[in-house]
Amino acid sequence: PNPNPNPNPNPNPNPNPNPNPNPNPNPNPNPNPNPNPNPIPIPIPIPIPIPIPIPNPYPYPYPYPYPYP
């Protein structure tokens, strides 16, 4: 009456269940390429020239008034 009731009940129930649902090919391609495109420039201190006293090559006292010829 039923020689082969179920010849192939479940040959391949789940051939590929879930190999990789979300492989994540590109997790974060560009995390932060330029966090601060225009940073505040650090001011460079300009050195103030300090005058160095030059010793007087002709020290006082001068003969004053200068003796004109």
Image (cartoon, rainbow, N blue to C red):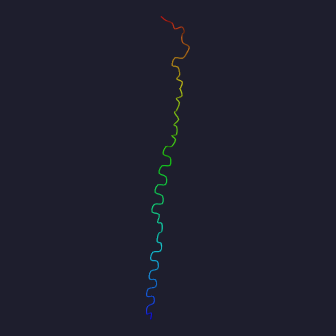
Foreground: 20 or 57?
20
Looking at the picture, tell me which residue is in the foreground, 47 or 56: 47
Q: Is residue 1 left or right of residue 60?
A: left
- The residue lying furthest to the bottom in this view is 1
Question: Which residue lies at the image location 52% right of the left edge and 17% below the top edge?
Answer: 58
Q: Residue at the spot x=47%, y=63% of the render? A: 24
- Tell which of 25 and 6 is nearer to you: 6
Residue 25: image location, x then y, percent? 45, 63
Horizontally, residue 26 falls left or right of residue 50, namely left
User: Where does residue 57 sit, x and y in percent of width and height?
Assistant: 51, 19
Residue 54, relative to residue 4: is it above or below?
above
What residue appears at the point 48 percent right and 45 percent down from the top-left corner?
37
- Image quadrant where one finds the N terminus: bottom left
> Residue 63 lies in what quarter of the image?
top right
Asked whether 66 or 7 is in front, the reply is 7
Query: Which residue occupies the extreme front position in the image?
Result: 1
Q: Quadrant of residue 60?
A: top right
Q: Position of residue 3 (x, y in %)?
A: 43, 93
Q: Position of residue 48 (x, y in %)?
A: 53, 30
- The answer to whether 42 is drawn above or below residue 7 in the figure is above
